[in-house]
Image: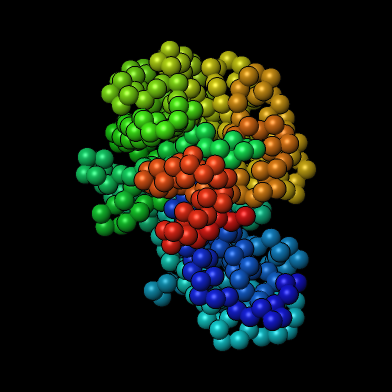
Amino acid sequence: MQQWMGIGMPTEQQLSEVLSEFARTVVTDYSVPEVLGRLVQRVVDVMPVDGAGVTLISRAGETRYVAPSAQVARFGPSTAPTFTFSISDDGERFGVLDLYCESADTLDAAAIDLAQTLADVAAAYLRNARVPGAFDNPGVAGRVHGETLLDLRAHELPLEESALERDLRGAAVRGELRAEYQPIVDTRSGRILGLESLLRWHHPTRGLVLPSMVIPLAERTTAIAEIGRWILVRACSDLARWQRHGDRDHLGISVNISARELSSAEYPRSVAAVLASSGADPACVTLEMTEPALLQDQERAAAVLAELKRVGVKLALDDVGTRGLSLSYLEQLPIDMIKIDREFVAELDDDGASFAIVAAMIDFAHEMSISVVAEGVETSGQRERLAALGCERCQGYYFAWPMAADDIEVLIEGVDGAATSLPSFDARLRRRNGMMELPK
């Protein structure tokens, strides 16, 4: 049980940090269960309770218990929560925030107000959490801890998707797209070795559209070609600009490519044209693809990859381990790098099976002279284990959040000039900008 005697309720600054972290998590590509899971864990961190969870209610009245905190294993659906707070918005009830306490003490007024504020934050997120293409079945948003999470607005998705698909066409021309970058670092030293470019769409009336919505929408339309070219041009141009200042020849950029691009015979020529116009060194550009993109048309994908290698870029396979692709398949492809999915990295601290799987991935890749990046690194313990396993590169919130190009410039200058370790420097940068500090 947490020891709250003499500590009291969190300050406004601590609450601000929780809300800021939640807002940042919402605009990542985390799934709905993962976003809610992070929120309830922070509820336990800042409130005098021993566990928390979210129970969602479908329109048919069916309930699903999701997003438990790490401490809730001894509580859960079979145990009546000590306190329950409604998750509702504009008269629509989505579910409840369940809080568990081992003692019979009641929450004071300040704690009750705080809990309801956090429940209201969850409600606002759920009202806007529409993730097309992410459901295994209609109305199902995924699974967490063996429980199914229902999408409470599945009936609205077709209309919503149609409107967004229409608006997405021409978004690049209208200046609605943005690029953010997340550093990829040397696991041991923290030195920035590269940056992954991440697409952001700022809709003129809806605001920031969830990243997990944009690519599935674009891939169903011709907008994917427009968007793919825009992010490649932006990333290569920013890389060329960064490399013109200081000793940064080692710096690389990674750009995600879609299944449609990977199946286009014209794509390698388009990449070559962008490289020539931007002045970016092809050897410093890595194109990332997922296993499903490769498997859609393996023969055509292999041909396109061979052409891209002739252009001079590097190739990376993203989210390795999540789709059942045999690692031996890599022997047939000109892959330079694999990126271990954060699902395995997240469990390194306490799951022996995940540790063994990650170790096997790293060893297999190294046997084929393929470098390894671990995604989703969020703790010093994960970093230490990955370093011990020989994983040479890492990426994740422990090192830095995704940020705009101008902030990347400040970050690079600070690290280059002061030889500061990245986690501590990025924390200072975030404080300067009024942002939350990184989770450790």
Judge whether 355 appears above or below 432 on screen: above
Where residue 34 appears, as percent x and y from the top left, is: 56, 54
Q: Nearer the viewer, residue 244 or 82?
A: 244
Q: Residue furthest right?
A: 352
The structure residue drawn at horizontal position 62% and vertical position 55%, both measured from the top left corner, is: 440
What number of labels is visible? 0
Q: Residue furthest front?
A: 418
Q: Nearer the viewer, residue 22 or 295?
A: 22
Report if residue 292 is visible in the image. Answer: no
The structure residue drawn at horizontal position 36% and vertical position 25%, both measured from the top left corner, is: 280
Where, quadrant-wise, is the N terminus in this rendering? bottom right
Where residue 89 appears, as percent x and y from the top left, is: 42, 72
Judge whether 362 appears above or below 129 on screen: above
User: In the figure, is residue 208 to the left or right of 284?
Assistant: left
Where residue 29 appears, as percent x and y from the top left, is: 48, 47
Report if residue 44 is visible in the image. Answer: yes
The structure residue drawn at horizontal position 59% and vertical position 35%, both measured from the top left corner, is: 186
Where residue 139 appears, as percent x and y from the top left, is: 48, 53
Q: Nearer the viewer, residue 300 or 310?
A: 310
User: In the figure, is residue 117 to the left or right of 172?
Assistant: right
Q: Nearer the viewer, residue 162 or 191?
A: 191
State the image quarter where residue 43 is shown: bottom right
State the image quarter where residue 49 is shown: bottom right
Q: Residue furthest left?
A: 174
The structure residue drawn at horizontal position 36% and vertical position 30%, both measured from the top left corner, is: 244
